[in-house]
Image: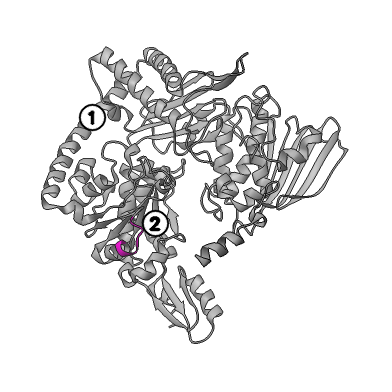
């Protein structure tokens, strides 16, 4: 009771805090930009900051102002200059520092903006070590300089510059630890902008990106294989689609909303998939009396869809998945003071109607496509039915033998399910660790968070899927059980875990198993890779300690730094297998500080070429690559002969 009374006395008026200006953003950056990161991943915070500033310039172009955007990016800093209208001069400071301030609330000015309404530039300002903005309008300019969100200088002056806005910023190194901009991520972002805004020239560090054919250029530039027919390109008001088919597995569909690359899809991508399936199903049912299943129609599809809607709602602050249901919603105030909402067409009906009408017309005008597409769908159908029979027999056999329960240690929550109240963020944390052998499986099982981390144990090495048929893979017990555990037998949208983590030993066998599992995903489930679900678990190679301090090192370089820091009485342990690490230690490596290397697949890379190089016949080129990149045990252990 005395403790409760003391706590009550300590909780007084002086404990109530009001965060001024953009201080809340600095306290809780994840609420505004998602993960912080160091720039290794394309969705790290520094790219969100860059995108927020470019989005403002893109919105100007969308409204008909400014045909060029100058972007300069080095490892640490960014500069963006557009030729739009410029921020109204008396509002420059407020627009970049006062929350819920901006013109994007007014649909007459920004009808279909992508930037964060009233938040975007403020978040960049708040999370930057230095932030400078200058607006040029009709011979005058207004400028403001900030440090970590606090105004340090501002004013007005005459200027001969063209109208527009200049923003320069350096992300705060106290928040973004050891960060640097990776140009491959920046270039991909800028390329996508050019595809989505035909005629707009984006000059990135002296290289100009400009598209004359929109999404058609995107699909043609990113094709990793020869399409079975010329891509179909359909453009309407507020919608643009491109589609073709290839012989690869899965669905490779890029989606955008108001210029935002929605990597995780959403209502518009679901509508696109449904509309294409429905339209082609009805077309062939009428034309050739064939009744095809949607999954066979979409197998091997390559495409892109972009829509423009008013005030989109996203399921995450970083805008990777569209949550909006309607094309637009408008609040109406009635004479009696009551309010109601007028809603436009649903995104589903809008996309369905457009594709149904235009794709059907296209096929009637381009009859040469009809037999090619039908042959592709029939081939997918035949393969799917054969695989379904094999998988059913395997599941029944394993169910009787109780193999499934022995191989999978499941978790409590899953990715594509409704989370209990207060557990909504758990879905993003769900992971399945794919391990080799009982020892590693047992270690991770004891160390894991059973709410969100599952463990699947492989027995031995899986088959090399590169040169095997899908039917042969379906007959493989290990991979069949893995597919079942992931929940993707029928549709990737049923994926049960957000993170698929390959956790193998750092020896030759472990590396080989890792490559075999990656090959499996690249060939048969490439969309899981494209969507950022597949990762490699980093585990420490060394434990370096003295009497007072212990450090885990993930590379030879980290080990050398640790040796210099700890200096005397140092003991070094070299880990060669996951089973050598105690589960108490391992809980640190798969907890909050887990290190994951995302398996990445850029749009320009050919899956077939990648797998041929790494998993095909042993060539001189591959031998040279291995010799140049492989570290020997002696090098890792630091043995000096």
In terms of image quadrants, where is residue 441? Answer: bottom left
Instruction: Give the image location of residue 519, x and y in percent.
Output: 32, 50
Q: Which residues are magenta?
A: 445-450
Q: As displayed, is residue 526 above or below residue 332?
A: below
- Magenta span includes 447: yes
- Residue 219 lies left or right of residue 141; in this view the side is left
Inter-mark Cα distance, 1 to 2: 33 Å
Rendered residue at 15%/45% (across/down):
394
Is any atom of residue 128 visible in this view? yes
Q: How many marks are shown on the rendered structure?
A: 2
The nearer-to-camera label among 1 and 2 is: 2
Question: According to the image, what is the colour scheme of the structure?
Answer: one colour
Q: Secondary structure at mark 1?
A: helix
Is any atom of residue 205 visible in this view? no
Q: As displayed, is residue 351 above or below residue 559?
A: above
Q: Nearer the viewer, residue 310 or 51?
A: 310
Rendered residue at 15%/37% (across/down):
389
User: Any mark on residue 381, and which?
Assistant: 1
- Magenta span includes 406: no
Instruction: Give the image location of residue 405, x and y in percent.
Output: 20, 53
User: Any mark on residue 497, and which?
Assistant: none
> The C terminus lies in which quarter of the figure?
bottom left
Instruction: Give the image location of residue 170, x and y in percent.
Output: 68, 52
Q: Nearer the viewer, residue 214 or 254?
A: 254
Q: Which residue is labeled 2 in the image? A: 536
């Amino acid at each position: 009771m005395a403790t409760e009374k003391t706590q009550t006395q300590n909780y007084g008026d002086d404990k109530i805090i009001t965060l001024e200006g953009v201080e809340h953003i600095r306290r809780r950056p994840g609420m505004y930009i998602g993960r912080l990161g160091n720039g290794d991943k394309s969705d790290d915070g520094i790219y969100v900051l860059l995108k927020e500033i470019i989005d403002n310039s893109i919105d100007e172009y969308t409204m008909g102002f400014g045909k060029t955007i100058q972007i300069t990016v080095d490892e640490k800093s960014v500069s963006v200059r557009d030729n739009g209208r410029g921020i109204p001069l008396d509002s420059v400071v407020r627009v970049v520092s006062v929350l819920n301030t901006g013109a994007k609330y007014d649909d007459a000015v920004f009808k279909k903006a992508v930037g964060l309404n009233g938040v975007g530039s403020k978040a960049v300002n708040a999370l930057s070590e230095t932030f400078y903005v200058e607006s040029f309008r009709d011979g005058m300019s207004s400028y403001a300089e900030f440090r970590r969100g606090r105004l340090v200088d501002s004013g007005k002056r005459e200027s001969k510059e063209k109208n527009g806005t200049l923003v320069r910023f350096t992300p705060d190194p106290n928040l973004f630890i050891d960060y640097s901009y990776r140009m491959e991520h920046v270039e991909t972002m800028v390329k996508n902008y050019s595809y989505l805004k035909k005629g707009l020239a984006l000059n990135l560090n002296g290289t100009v990106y400009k598209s004359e054919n929109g999404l058609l250029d995107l699909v043609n530039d990113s094709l990793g294989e020869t399409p079975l027919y010329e891509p179909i390109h359909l453009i309407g008001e507020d919608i643009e689609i491109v589609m073709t088919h290839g012989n690869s597995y899965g669905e490779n569909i890029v989606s955008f909303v108001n210029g935002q690359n929605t990597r995780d899809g959403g209502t518009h991508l679901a509508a696109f998939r449904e509309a294409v399936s429905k339209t082609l199903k009805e077309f062939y049912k009428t034309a050739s009396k064939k009744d095809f299943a949607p999954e066979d129609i979409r197998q091997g599809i390559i495409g892109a869809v972009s829509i423009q809607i008013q005030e989109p709602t996203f399921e995450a602050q970083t805008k990777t998945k569209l949550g909006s249901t309607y094309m637009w919603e408008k609040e109406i105030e009635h004479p009696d003071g009551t309010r109601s909402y007028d809603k436009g067409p649903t995104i589903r009906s809008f996309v369905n109607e457009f594709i149904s009408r235009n794709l059907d017309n296209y096929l009637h005008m381009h009859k040469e496509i009809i037999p090619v597409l039908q042959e592709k769908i029939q081939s997918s159908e035949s393969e799917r039915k054969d695989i379904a029979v094999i998988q059913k027999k395997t599941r029944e056999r394993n169910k009787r033998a109780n193999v499934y329960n022995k191989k999978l240690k499941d978790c409590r929550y899953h990715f594509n399910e409704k989370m209990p109240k207060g557990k909504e963020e758990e879905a993003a944390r769900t992971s399945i660790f794919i391990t080799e052998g009982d020892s590693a499986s047992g270690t991770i099982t004891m160390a894991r968070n059973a709410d969100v981390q599952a463990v699947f144990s492989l027995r031995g090495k899986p088959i090399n899927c590169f040169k095997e048929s899908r039917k042969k893979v379906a007959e493989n017990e290990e991979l069949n059980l893995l597919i079942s555990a992931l929940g993707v037998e029928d549709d990737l949208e049923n994926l049960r875990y957000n993170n698929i983590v390959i956790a193998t030993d750092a020896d030759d066998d472990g590396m080989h198993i890792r490559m075999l599992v990656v090959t499996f995903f690249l060939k048969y489930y490439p969309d899981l890779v494209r969507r950022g679900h597949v990762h490699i678990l980093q585990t420490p190679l060394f434990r370096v300690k003295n009497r007072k301090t212990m450090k885990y090192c993930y590379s030879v370089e980290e080990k050398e730094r640790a040796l210099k820091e700890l200096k005397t009485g140092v003991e070094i342990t070299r880990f060669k297998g996951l089973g050598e690490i105690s589960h108490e230690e391992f809980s640190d490596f798969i907890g909050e500080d887990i290190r994951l290397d995302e398996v990445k697949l850029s749009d320009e890379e050919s899956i077939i070429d990648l797998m041929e190089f790494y998993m095909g016949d042993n060539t001189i080129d591959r031998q040279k690559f291995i010799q140049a990149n492989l570290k020997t045990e002696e090098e890792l252990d630091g043995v000096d002969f």
